[in-house]
Amino acid sequence: MKERILTAAEQLFWKYGVRSVTMEDIARKLGISKKTIYQHFTDKEGILYQIIQGKVETDVSQMDCMAVETANPIEEIMMVMEMMRKNQHAVSPNLIMDIKRHYPHAYALFRTHMDQHLMKSILENIQKGVSQGVYRPDINPAILARMRIEQIELAFNNDFFPTDQYSMLDTQRELIHHFVRGMLTEQGFTVYNLYVNQHNHENTIYQANDADLATRTAE
Amino acid sequence: MKERILTAAEQLFWKYGVRSVTMEDIARKLGISKKTIYQHFTDKEGILYQIIQGKVETDVSQMDCMAVETANPIEEIMMVMEMMRKNQHAVSPNLIMDIKRHYPHAYALFRTHMDQHLMKSILENIQKGVSQGVYRPDINPAILARMRIEQIELAFNNDFFPTDQYSMLDTQRELIHHFVRGMLTEQGFTVYNLYVNQHNHENTIYQANDADLATRTAE
């Protein structure tokens, strides 16, 4: 039952945002009573906390896989974009800011994940890129990794990027390409251009299917 | 007298931070009584506010000059670095965070300046760079300009870049070079490399003179 509650709550939260979903809504979706939910969770933030905990574990596994399975650090970092694209449809654009503003305990878990696992993953990516000669040897990995993490959080901030003007995916795409390009050596550019050209065809198909989504806006 | 108070306060604030300087310290530096200061300003934040107001005006003039006097948008953006380098010696590394945390009224003035004048200046720089062919035509100026502004603020944040580990100047330099490089076309790289090579000699001299500064740390 606990797993079923988590799954139903996640679907509702991701679609409508956490604030507008009640315990009643979750119970109704499952055809159970609110009392049953309260047997497993103390409150809505308790459910959210466990959902994020699960997401963090999945994310850590995915990052480990990507580091191993990709041919080079450039491809590895661009794969994050592919992952975001796959998950984008299901997620309400204001979700992260909603959590940050109103559920500090659950948000802290997400933030710790960024500061630890994501920081480590980005640092390793940069060091690998430098040692393979695709990133500049004169960069300071700690400064750029910190900048990258704050960039990811910035893209979620709907004060700076209002969701009626920017699609979160466009913002993240802009920032990730800029981030990689700013580190490339000449050799790195060859690898990067190869990757971009390979994926242009797929992107075109994707964008055509995606054109009617309300979160996408004309640039 | 008002101007003399502003000048003396600025010197003390920039050197020791705003919080640790008292109205008494400012009066003593000028050999006047505290009462004389209170004839011109209601409190310490009032002095700080007028100092920042003056700085903002100077900054706007300097940005206008740089846009006109520099040969191209790449040189224009790198000139910011030169300006920071010239002003660096006089400024306590925690100054901006000190102001942000404890003097919200004065900080808001600085933040408004960034969101308006600096945003406009960066946007124009990007648009100029794109039209001259030195920046990529596929960038979204609004997204990158916003990112750049938040980057400048990030570099001042001593939670992320503790001043005993990072010199603010090194962090800003890392971020500004990464920012420009991430936008360059091949033609842009030629211009950028020319600029960097021209300035390498000057930088070497500067760094040698600067090596004993406590704010500079080994990388």
Image: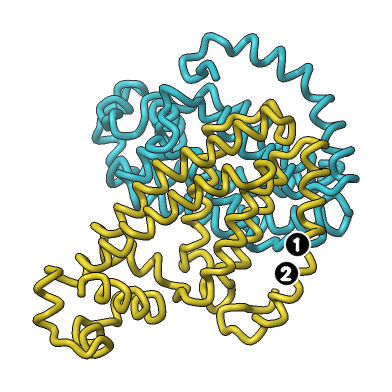
Chain colours: A cyan, B yellow
Q: Quadrant of residue B24?
A: bottom left
Relative to residue B104, is residue A73 depicted above or below? Answer: above
Q: Is residue B113 visible?
A: yes
- Looking at the rendered structure, the kind of residue marked 2 is Asn
Asked if the residues shown at circle 2 and circle 1 are in contact, with their CB atoms under 8 angstroms apart, the answer is yes
Return the x and y of residue A130 as percentages of the image width and height: 82, 57
**Residue under the point 56% across and 79% down:** B215
> Which element carries disc 2, helix, strand or loop?
helix
Which chain hosts label 1? B
Return the x and y of residue B133 as percentages of the image width and height: 74, 30
Q: CA distance from mark 2 to mark 1?
A: 6 Å
- In the rendered structure, the answer to whether residue B58 lies left or right of residue A42 reads right
Residue A95 or A150: which is nearer the viewer? A150
Return the x and y of residue B21 as percentages of the image width and height: 28, 82
Q: Is residue A84 visible?
A: no
Q: Report the quarter where the C terminus of chain B lies.
A: bottom right
> Which element carries disc 1, helix, strand or loop?
helix
Graded by Cα atoms within 10 Å as few (under 14), some (14 to 19) or many (20 or more), the crowding at tag 1 reads few
- Let me know if marks 2 and 1 both belong to one chain: yes
Q: Quadrant of residue A165?
A: top left
Relative to residue B72, is residue B28 depicted above or below? Answer: below
- In the rendered structure, the answer to whether residue A32 lies left or right of residue A124 reads left
**Residue under the point 68% across and 49% down:** B75
Return the x and y of residue B202 as percentages of the image width and height: 74, 69
**Residue under the point 50% across and 41% down:** B121
Residue at mark 1: B199
- In the rendered structure, the answer to whether residue A105 lies left or right of residue B32 reads right
Residue at mark 2: B203
Label number found at residue A44: none
Q: Report the quarter where the N terminus of chain B lies.
A: bottom left
Residue A180 or B21: which is nearer the viewer? B21
- Looking at the rendered structure, the kind of residue marked 1 is His
